[in-house]
Amino acid sequence: MTSVAMAEPRPRIPAGARVVVQEGFYEGLELPIDAAWLVIGRGASADWTLSELTISRSHAAFGWDGETFFVEDLGSTNGTFVNGERRSRVPLQDGDGVQIGRLRLRVALPSRALDGDPR
């Protein structure tokens, strides 16, 4: 008889979270944060592939840790900035500005995520 390991349940991600490109070649593009881990970069393995020379192949990850949305730098050359400060990992708030390379992004989070309600 073999034992089957139970997979740990994935955190339910609040609907409606997104990143909007405010400045740069992709201005106006909206990217949904609809998974627990989404890599943004110019490499083919990135979840969000953007052909921008100032971002690394795997520049940063946006996601949901079960309690908060976050952005995490993945060792990029030019860094990840949140509200003007270079950061390695930071919880996100609605309206936060994120800069990766020349791209300026704005985070839009649903109000229920801010209240801790995942529905």
Image (cartoon, grey):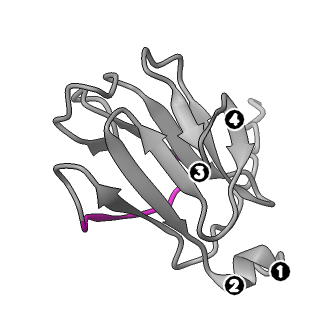
Which of marks 3 and 2 precedes in the sequence?
Answer: 3
* Residue extent of the magenta highlight: 28-37
- Is residue 86 rendered to the left or right of residue 31? right
Asked whether disc 2 touches disc 4, contact meaning CB atoms under 8 Å apart, the reply is: no
Please report the residue visible at 70 percent of the width from the left and 64 percent of the height from the top. Answer: 93
Q: Mark 1 points at which residue?
A: 115
Which of marks 4 and 2 precedes in the sequence?
Answer: 4
- Is residue 61 rendered to the left or right of residue 24? right
**Residue 1 screen position, x and y as percent:** 77, 31
Residue at disc 4, secondary structure: strand
Query: What's the mark number on residue 89?
Result: 4
Residue at disc 3, secondary structure: strand
Q: Name the residue under label 3.
A: 63
Q: Name the residue under label 2.
A: 111
Distance (Cα) linking label 2 and label 3: 16 Å
16 in relation to 88, above or below: below
Quarter holding the C terminus?
bottom right
